[in-house]
């Protein structure tokens, strides 16, 4: 299987837990015989979409075109990010707005839209300081659902599985290590 790992943490510092999760998943995927390519959003420099004209433009910045090619190449996409203010970090959202534009994620004509990334599966992993149960019950995991349905699902990716890792700031080293082992196992399976 060809796997694209999108490390969505906007801070490229290697000590961030999202980086460790992405690395563990990638290591497991390689152990499982999968081919892996990684996009580290925090290391990319790209313009932000500010207008409808920006979104509809034929010009796609080279770094975004490369990310699109990697996602198009993949059979499975693994996306990990931290929850900030109950949502995706702004820089990750800006990246997704650039990547999942018209003619890449969907084709629109008079009869409606056609998803262009069908045949791919995905896993979203969200880390957060709050307990995951609180995120699910109080916030209804709204940002996760929006990403799952409105971006990945809308473009045709199915199934889109999710993992919520709450309480990371209060977790013990053993708990954090257990989650890394879980990501490695998922990577081996390509799930």
Image (cartoon, grey):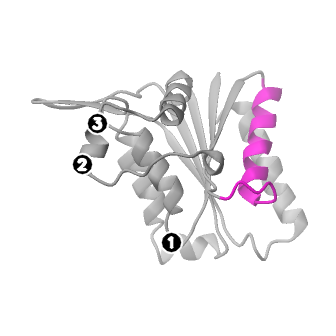
Q: Is residue 135 left or right of residue 29?
A: left
| Label 2: few (<14), some (14–19) or many (≥20) C-alpha neighbours in 10 Å | few
Position in image of residue 60 (x %, y %):
40, 33
Q: Is the magenta stretch mostly helix, strand or loop?
A: helix
Q: Residue 57 carries which label?
A: 3
Earlier in the chain: of badge 1 and badge 2, it is: 2
The residue positioned 78% from the left and 43% from the top of the image is: 23
Local secondary structure at mark 1: loop
Is residue 190 covered in magenta?
no
Q: In this view, does 84 lie above or below 184?
A: below
Which residue is label 1 attached to?
86
The secondary element bearing badge 2 is classed as helix
Label 3 – label 2 distance at C-alpha? 8 Å
Q: Which of 185 and 6 is in front in this view?
A: 6
Return the x and y of residue 159 as percentages of the image width and height: 48, 37
Residue 72 rendering spot, x and y as whole percentages: 49, 25
Q: Which residue is drawn at 38% across and 33% down?
A: 156
Which disc is residue 59 wearing?
A: none
Q: Are marks 3 and 1 in contact (CB under 8 Å)?
A: no
Residue 123, position as x, y percentages in the image: 58, 43
Per the rendered image, the range of residues in magenta is: 11-32
Q: Distance of mark 3 from mark 1, alpha carbons? A: 30 Å
Residue hosting label 2: 52
């Amino acid at each position: 299987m060809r796997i694209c790992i999108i490390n969505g943490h906007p801070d490229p510092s290697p000590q961030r837990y999202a980086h460790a999760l992405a690395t563990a998943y990638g290591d497991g995927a390689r152990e499982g015989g999968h081919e892996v390519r990684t996009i580290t959003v925090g290391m990319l420099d790209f313009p932000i979409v500010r207008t409808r004209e920006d979104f509809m433009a034929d010009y796609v910045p080279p770094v975004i075109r490369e990310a699109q090619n990697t996602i198009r190449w993949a059979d499975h996409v693994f996306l990990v990010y931290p929850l900030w203010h109950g949502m995706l970090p702004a820089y990750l959202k800006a990246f997704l707005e650039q990547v999942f534009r018209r003619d890449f994620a969907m084709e629109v004509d008079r009869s409606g839209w056609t998803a262009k990334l069908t045949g791919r599966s995905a896993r979203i992993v969200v880390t957060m300081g709050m307990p995951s149960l609180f995120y699910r019950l109080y916030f209804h995991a709204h940002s996760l659902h929006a990403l799952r349905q409105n971006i990945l699902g809308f473009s045709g990716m199915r199934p889109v599985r999710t993992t919520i890792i709450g309480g990371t700031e209060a977790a013990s080293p053993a708990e954090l290590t257990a989650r890394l082992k879980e990501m490695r196992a998922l990577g081996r399976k390509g799930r």
